[in-house]
């Protein structure tokens, strides 16, 4: 059975193309942080791919997330609180060491720098799935 | 007899005491290249030194602002400039003659600034502290760096030391005068006697010697320098070298450190004279450690209040550039709870009048508060303390630096101590207005400290500004990376999907359309970047020879943006009336870029399933055109309407809607409109709760 991966990404074109490209997985697309959180609550998932730069949802203080520059960090923290064992991979263009540290502290398993390609994403996904297996 | 006061702990001294009690101070000069006194460990050295210097020599320290346009004019110094008679001589004279920016003799003031700056630049990458000058006086000048830029110079005032001040043996070497004096022997003897015995004349003597030197060498300073060097080399002169000064500095640091240790047991019991020095030291230190800046300034104000015997001081600034407001930065002597209400006040009209009154003179003056009751911060003050009895005194500290004016409001609550009649101030009256309830020497202290305080606050704002700019730059780089990488990434991914035939023909066709949109996005980005670069290099040229069919151009832009718009189900509509227009003469490429920018912004910041309406009309009066772009989105606040045209500025609401974007698009729009001597208006009208109709109107005359 295909692993189910939630992809939270506000760029709809990228969302669609990744969904097409990653045919080995069941990609669940979410084009906003709010939709993503809803799906995390509702569905059984094997992993989450999460874009870092997204418009912040209403329940997050825009100032905390640099007016959207680090929305993914807060979303990651929320997902981690809900599902402590769910692998989360952050998709990022950020190089700022402070932000990278915040991503690490938010409970993300991996950070993947954009541009992202399906091969690389699969590689990272398999890595976190294996780690999870070993952990169990 | 000196007065003794007990002070609250000076904030910076407390920090230093904790860190360096017991004389454990770091070396003066590090082996590594020093970034300037504000960087690394330099800041503590500066503070300790300030403390030690103020206490030990009772010598006032002064802070001179350095304006950016002056720095630009100065060439990087050559090796030879490092120890140059001319620099040092000018420095001495300029420090003595330095006048505030408000004074009319601008040539002298510019000259002073320039030689100070030259001097400081000549010290850049060398010892940060100046050295003994040839004329026998000692002093130092410390460049205050902020992000590699000299923003101010902290310097001793090269003048006679105060009577009774301690000048340790050898501090001024008695025979360091470079040349035998050839003037009247008897006068010379008297001078020398004075030199040795009476510090009153040291300064005059130094100046006299400089002038004598100039006479001898026909004002050829290079000859003088050569002569002096020769004499030093032949040991005819016991010259003071930079090394000597370093030794003196180290001694002074050790003294300062011991002094700091002593302070631990003294409960800050200081003589009144020293308090002035301490206040200066704290003020100087406020710059080097920006944390707790206002606490330090408040501590200084508290001292002033006690020294001068007034009841309250408010430090207020007025920033011409940003908002028409008076801003209260800190205060003392007023109840804490009264402060928050006075933090910010946005006003106009009355404020201009008020400010012009203050500008009339930089001396202490009195203002009739009753007249300015419409200015909220002043009306608060009036209601609390001013009613019918007395009036505060306003002191201007500085008003030509970075468009910011800083002034103090001083107050006296006790009417009995107010021994004068109220005097009306005319805007052009530059004569001093006596504030008789202040002692003369207190007035002098107050004016000097207020001026320095003003400079420090200005420099503080400069530091803040630079910090903000740095942050903005980091954000910009990330945004640019995002703007560039995202479409490239998307195109590559789509191409890969197409190559591997992973999709149905229908989906493939949609993907190809998507790729085109991504390429257009990239193209627009490249065009914007290119135009921005041309603006930056002052190389932007306009080609007005081509006639533009406005409707056609708008339609093409709409088509280019249609996919982006379709993503959010946004419809772009163009007023058909525009089709009837005759062609206009404008730079077609740039107009297209402007239109695309406005449409792109419209799409970005519109709610989904709305419309962008482009309409326009012929401006018959100016034989021009007006184009309007209306979209339904978030509010553009009044305070942001001007700022969104600043480079890299992005409104908070805009970022909330779309965190990407580099905040440069509207800069280009503004540049275009300015070129054609037009204007751009923004209106934001609430049409439903939380939904605003935002209308950008471009007025282009003579089109």
Image (tube, helix red, strand yellow):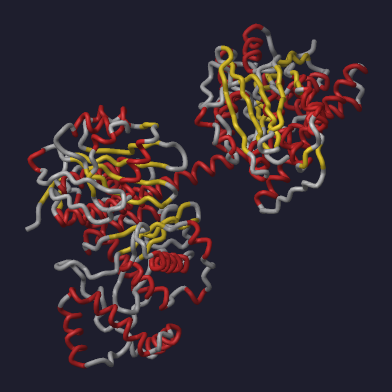
Question: Which residue appears at 62% of the width and 28% of the height?
Answer: B659
Q: Residue A119: in sight, yes or no?
A: no
In the image, taking residue B239 as reference, residue B644 lies left or right, namely: right
- From the viewer's perspective, is residue B601 above or below residue B331? above
Q: Position of residue B575 (x, y in %)?
A: 75, 23
Identify the image quadrant of residue B547: top right
Q: Quadrant of the N terminus of chain B?
A: bottom left
- From the viewer's perspective, is residue B585 above or below residue B383? below
Identify the image quadrant of residue B151: bottom left
Q: Residue B562: in sight, yes or no?
A: yes
In the image, taking residue B499 as reference, residue B674 lies left or right, namely: left
Question: Which residue appears at 83% of the width and 31% of the height?
Answer: B552
Query: In this orientation, which residue lies closer to the viewer: B565 or B349?
Result: B349
Q: Position of residue B635 (x, y in %)?
A: 56, 22
Identify the image quadrant of residue A31: top right
Q: Position of residue B533 (x, y in %)?
A: 69, 48
Question: Which residue appears at 76% of the width and 33% of the height?
Answer: B521
- From the viewer's perspective, is residue B422 above or below residue B699? below
Query: In this orientation, which residue lies closer to the viewer: B424 or B418?
Result: B424
In the image, taking residue A36 as reference, residue B77 lies left or right, namely: left
- From the viewer's perspective, is residue B455 above or below residue B614? below
Q: Quadrant of the C terminus of chain B?
A: top right
In the image, taking residue B418 as reference, residue B554 lies left or right, namely: right
Kindly give the residue lying farthest to the front in the view shown. B621
Query: In this orientation, which residue lies closer to the viewer: B664 or B288?
Result: B664
């Amino acid at each position: 059975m295909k692993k189910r991966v939630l992809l939270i990404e506000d760029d709809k074109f990228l969302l669609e193309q990744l969904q097409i490209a990653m045919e080995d997985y069941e990609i669940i697309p979410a084009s906003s942080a709010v939709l993503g959180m809803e799906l995390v609550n509702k569905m059984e998932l094997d992993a989450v791919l999460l874009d870092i730069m997204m418009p912040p949802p209403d329940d997050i203080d825009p100032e905390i997330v640099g007016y959207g520059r680090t929305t993914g960090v807060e979303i990651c923290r929320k997902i981690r609180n809900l599902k402590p064992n769910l692998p989360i991979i952050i998709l990022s263009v950020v190089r700022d060491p402070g932000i990278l540290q915040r991503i690490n502290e938010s409970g993300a398993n991996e950070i993947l720098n954009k541009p992202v390609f399906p091969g690389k994403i699969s590689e990272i996904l398999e890595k976190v799935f294996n780690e999870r297996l070993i952990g169990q | 007899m000196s007065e003794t006061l007990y002070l609250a702990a000076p904030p910076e001294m407390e920090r230093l005491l904790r860190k360096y009690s017991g004389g454990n101070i770091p070396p003066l000069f590090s082996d590594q290249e020093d970034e300037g006194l504000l960087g690394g460990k330099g800041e503590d050295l500066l503070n300790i030194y300030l403390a030690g210097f103020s206490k030990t020599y009772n010598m006032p320290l002064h802070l001179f602002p350095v304006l950016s346009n002056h720095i630009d004019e100065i060439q990087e110094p050559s090796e030879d400039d490092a120890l140059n008679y001319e620099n040092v001589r000018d420095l001495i004279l300029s420090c003595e003659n330095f006048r505030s920016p408000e004074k009319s003799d601008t040539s002298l003031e510019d000259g002073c600034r320039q030689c100070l700056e030259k001097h400081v630049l000549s010290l850049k990458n060398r010892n940060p502290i100046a050295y003994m000058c040839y004329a026998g006086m000692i002093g130092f000048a410390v460049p205050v760096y902020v992000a590699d830029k000299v923003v101010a110079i902290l310097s001793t005032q090269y003048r006679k030391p105060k009577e009774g001040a301690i000048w340790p043996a050898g501090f001024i070497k008695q025979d360091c005068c470079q040349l035998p004096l050839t003037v009247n022997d008897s006068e010379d003897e008297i001078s020398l006697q004075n030199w040795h015995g009476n510090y009153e004349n040291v300064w005059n003597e130094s100046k006299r010697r400089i002038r004598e030197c100039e006479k001898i060498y026909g004002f050829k300073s290079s000859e003088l320098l050569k002569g002096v060097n020769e004499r030093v080399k032949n040991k005819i002169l016991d010259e003071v070298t930079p090394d000597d000064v370093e030794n003196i500095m180290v001694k002074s640091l050790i003294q300062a450190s011991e002094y700091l240790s002593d302070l631990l047991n003294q409960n800050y019991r200081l003589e009144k004279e020293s308090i002035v020095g301490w206040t200066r030291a704290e003020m100087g230190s406020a710059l080097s450690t920006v944390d707790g800046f206002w606490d330090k300034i408040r501590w200084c104000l508290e001292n002033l209040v006690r020294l001068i015997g007034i009841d309250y001081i408010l430090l207020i600034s007025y920033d011409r550039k940003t908002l028409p407001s008076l801003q209260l930065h800190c205060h003392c002597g007023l109840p804490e709870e009264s402060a928050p209400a006075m933090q910010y006040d946005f006003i106009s009209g009355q404020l201009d009048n008020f400010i012009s009154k203050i500008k009339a003179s930089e001396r202490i003056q009195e203002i009739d508060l009753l007249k300015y009751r419409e200015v909220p911060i002043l009306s608060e003050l009036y209601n609390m303390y001013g009613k019918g009895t007395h009036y505060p005194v306003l002191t201007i500290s500085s008003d030509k630096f970075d468009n910011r004016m800083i002034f103090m409001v001083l107050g006296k609550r006790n009417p009995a101590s107010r021994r004068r009649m109220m005097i009306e101030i005319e805007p052009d009256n530059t004569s001093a207005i006596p504030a008789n309830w202040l002692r003369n020497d207190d007035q002098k202290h107050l004016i000097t400290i207020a001026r320095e305080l003003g400079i420090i606050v200005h420099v503080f704002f400069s530091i803040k500004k630079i910090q903000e700019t740095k942050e903005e730059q980091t954000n910009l780089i990330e945004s640019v990376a995002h703007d560039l990488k995202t479409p490239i990434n998307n195109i590559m991914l789509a191409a890969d999907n197409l190559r591997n035939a992973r999709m149905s023909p229908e989906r493939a066709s949609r993907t190809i359309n998507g790729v085109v949109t991504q390429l257009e996005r990239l193209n627009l980005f490249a065009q914007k970047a290119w135009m921005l670069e041309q603006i930056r290099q002052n190389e932007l040229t306009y080609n007005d020879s081509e006639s533009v069919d406005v409707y056609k151009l708008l339609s093409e832009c709409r088509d280019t943006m249609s996919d982006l718009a379709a993503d959010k189900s946004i419809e772009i509509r163009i007023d058909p009336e525009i089709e009837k227009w005759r062609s206009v003469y404008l730079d077609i490429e740039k107009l297209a870029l402007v239109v695309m920018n406005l449409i792109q912004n419209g799409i970005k910041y519109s709610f989904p399933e709305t419309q962008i309406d482009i309409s326009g009309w012929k401006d018959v009066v100016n034989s021009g055109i007006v184009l309007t772009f209306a979209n339904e989105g978030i509010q553009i606040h009044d305070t942001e309407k001007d700022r969104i045209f600043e480079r890299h500025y992005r409104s908070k609401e805009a970022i909330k809607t779309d965190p990407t974007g580099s905040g440069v698009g509207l800069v280009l729009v503004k540049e275009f409109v300015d070129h054609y001597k037009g204007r751009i208006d923004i209106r934001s009208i609430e049409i439903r709760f939380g939904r605003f109709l935002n209308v950008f109107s471009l007025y282009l005359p003579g089109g």
